[in-house]
Image (cartoon, grey):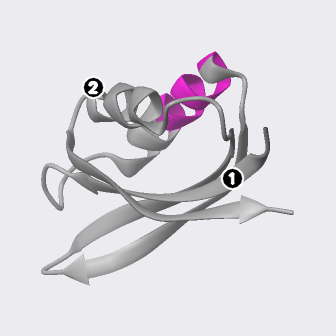
Amino acid sequence: MGTVVMKIKLMPESPETDLKKIEENVRKVIDGFGVKLHELEKQAIAFGLIALIITVVWPEEKDPDLLENALRSITDVQSVEITDVRRLL
């Protein structure tokens, strides 16, 4: 099986949410799966709300819903959405 790159958008509960704390928890969750966090960036949405966009390298044979559900369980994360999946050659 191959490897995919996934972009995942995490929306915090509010503009006052501590993004550094969410970032730390995201890194812990990803490390727990033994996969590589390729990139973590912030994207301004509206009214001071900032989303975290993470890019991970994920084994194709693993169900991406496992990671999505684990990220969704992080405190102060309102929603998690896989926005892009591409297969690495």
Nearest to the observer: residue 61 or residue 72: 61
Residue 68 drawn at (x, y percent): 38, 37
Q: Position of residue 5 (x, y in %)?
A: 67, 57
Q: Using the rendered image of the protein, determine whether residue 38 is visible from the camera's viewpoint.
A: no
Q: Residues within 10 Å of mark 1 (few under 14, many from 20)?
A: some
- For marks 2 and 1, the one nearer the N-term is 1
| Residue range highlighted in magenta | 24-32
Element on which disc 2 rests: loop
Residue at (23, 51) in percent of width and height: 12
- What label sits on residue 24 in the rendered view? none
Q: Which mark is residue 4?
A: 1
Name the residue carrying label 2: 73
Q: Quadrant of residue 40?
A: bottom right
Provide the major secondary structure of the magenta segment. helix
Across and down, in percent, residue 58 comes to 67, 41
Given the image, on which type of amino acid does mark 1 rest? Val
Q: Nearer the viewer, residue 49 or 63?
A: 63
